[in-house]
Image: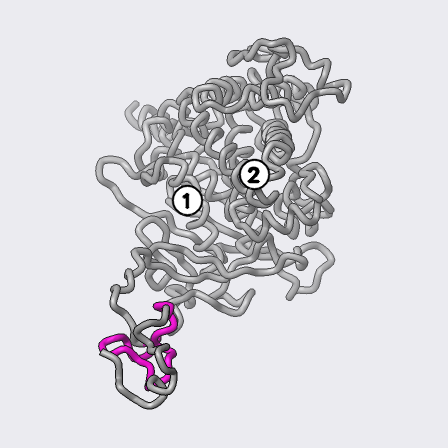
Amino acid sequence: MIHQQAPTQQAGERTLAGLEVPEAQLGRLPAALRVEGAAPSAPDRREVPVPVPVVNGHRFLVYKQDPSVTSLGVRVVFVPTVVLNGPKDTRIQTELADVAPVARNAGGDFIFTPNTPQFDCAHTFAVARLTLSMYERHNGGDPIPFAWNVGGNTDRITVHPHAGVGANAFYSRTAKVLKFLFFVPQGQPADGKVFTCRSLDIVAHEMGHAILDGLKPGWLSADNPPQTGGLHEAFGDLTAIFVALGQPDQAEALVALTKANLHDRSFLPALAEEFGRALGLPTGLRDADNDLKLSEVGNEVHAISQVFTGALYDILADVYAFELDRQRRTKDPTAVLIEVANGLCKLLFDAIVASPATGAAYADVANQMLQLSASRGDPAVYRTFIRNRFAVREVTTAATPLADLMSGRMRMTDADYTGDGRDATEVEPYDETSASLRAEQDRSRCCGTMQMPEYRAIGADRLAQRGPLDDDDILRDDLEELRRAFSK
Ligand SMILES: [Zn+2]
């Protein structure tokens, strides 16, 4: 019923009962006009229960690239899983003497002043966690085991943000760790330390090694061909690129900076900028936007890796150019970039999973990418981009003609373009006698992971069996020799 009060009466026949009062306005009506039984005011009106968020999570502060890329700085990221003090969760824990476990703040978040030891713990954990989550999404949401997670073993990987002095970082299966070292660059004062853990690229790269070792435990052994080692290094670098492009504000900054041309100079292909600069390399430790061919790199794994990374970077740029044109009237360029990067990352992930357990070569992954791309229904031009880029880098033969690409006349925006009408999904290695397929691996310029004795001393077949390693595994041949000597 209506309160029979003066204002309503004065409105004549325009009583409240006859008015269309929007539901949302009811709470704001003067007391005299309120309908009895309706909620008295907006804040208390909760007829429908508020859905309780199903996602628990915490905020972390991370560098978008590293401390030297000041134009990007830091950002707050939301990690949508339960993280305990440490930080530590079901897969990753943090170790730093006298600092860890780092406690969450009153809001449940890991937000600390940049460059403090607490920040370094939170940053390193968060980037490692984002990297693992990215690949677990590509794995259908299922957890990806670390190489030692067999037979019900759930041991975490331990992240050491300040692992010691040195210009390096590494992953070790034996120790189940990621270790990030720090150093003072030549000519810098003692307080000018560079901490490798503050680089998103370096943390993502090393976590990439750990994840790939879980997926393909036989690939880290140095008795594989150099290209298999190149796949490990390239996977780390590409992981850093895909993690960066998974952050919408980074993708947006990149689109604005380059006017949506991924071959324009930018922070994206420059990997480990601060670290590289400390070593006198202005475009970072490695440049993903390179033109290296297999015939130019011999058996040096670090350089070989850049051939694969460069091919994938070119494919990313090609697919982006195509999708940007196709969706230009319906979607924002940043949204297109995020989707394209996500789709290519998934394709690479699936192709690697489908590749041989040991001795994998670039052509194996290229062929898996072609077949998976066809089976998931990508436009034919996607396969043309893949075939072309691997062929130009002398990884594979050109199954379809390169003439249009090489003369700058390729129809990048034609979804059906194949070169000669054949949508080939099988390519051959360009040169079976290439040192990158035949020689011993030269790992002298690789990251710390590739230098670890466990991956040099233990054969690919043993590593491929998964499971934990111990020091005796590394020394097995020497111990066997001793045993023979002592039994004489
Ligand atoms: Zn590496």
Q: Is mark 2 within 8 Å of ligand 1?
A: yes
Residue 85 in picture, x, y percent from top left:
35, 64
Is 343 rendered above or below residue 109? above
Question: Which range of residues does the magenta coloring cover?
Answer: 21-43
What is the tally of numbered marks visible in this picture? 2
Residue visible at 64% across and 36% down in the picture: 288
Q: Are marks 2 and 1 in contact (CB under 8 Å)?
A: no
- Tell whether position 38 is magenta: yes
- Note whether residue 130 is visible: yes
Specify the farthest residue to the bottom.
6
Give how far apart the Cα atoms at labels 2 and 1 are. Answer: 15 Å
Residue 417 in picture, x, y percent from top left:
62, 17
Q: Element type at marker 1?
A: helix
Which of the marked residues, 2 or 1, is nearer the chain's N terminus? 1
Q: Quadrant of the N terminus?
A: bottom left
Residue 65 in picture, x, y percent from top left:
59, 52
Q: Quadrant of the C terminus?
A: top left
Is 22 rendered above or below residue 217? below
Residue 406 in picture, x, y percent from top left:
74, 18
Of 201 and 391, the residue lying toward us: 391
Q: Describe residue 153's horizontal placement relative to residue 96 as left or right.
A: left
Q: Describe residue 224's horizontal placement relative to residue 257 as left or right.
A: left
Q: Which residue is mark 1?
A: 132
Of 14 and 162, the residue lying toward us: 14
Specify the farthest residue to the right.
407
- Amino acid type at mark 1: Leu
Q: Which residue is mark 2?
A: 237
Q: Element type at marker 2?
A: helix
Residue visible at 67% across and 55% down in the picture: 185
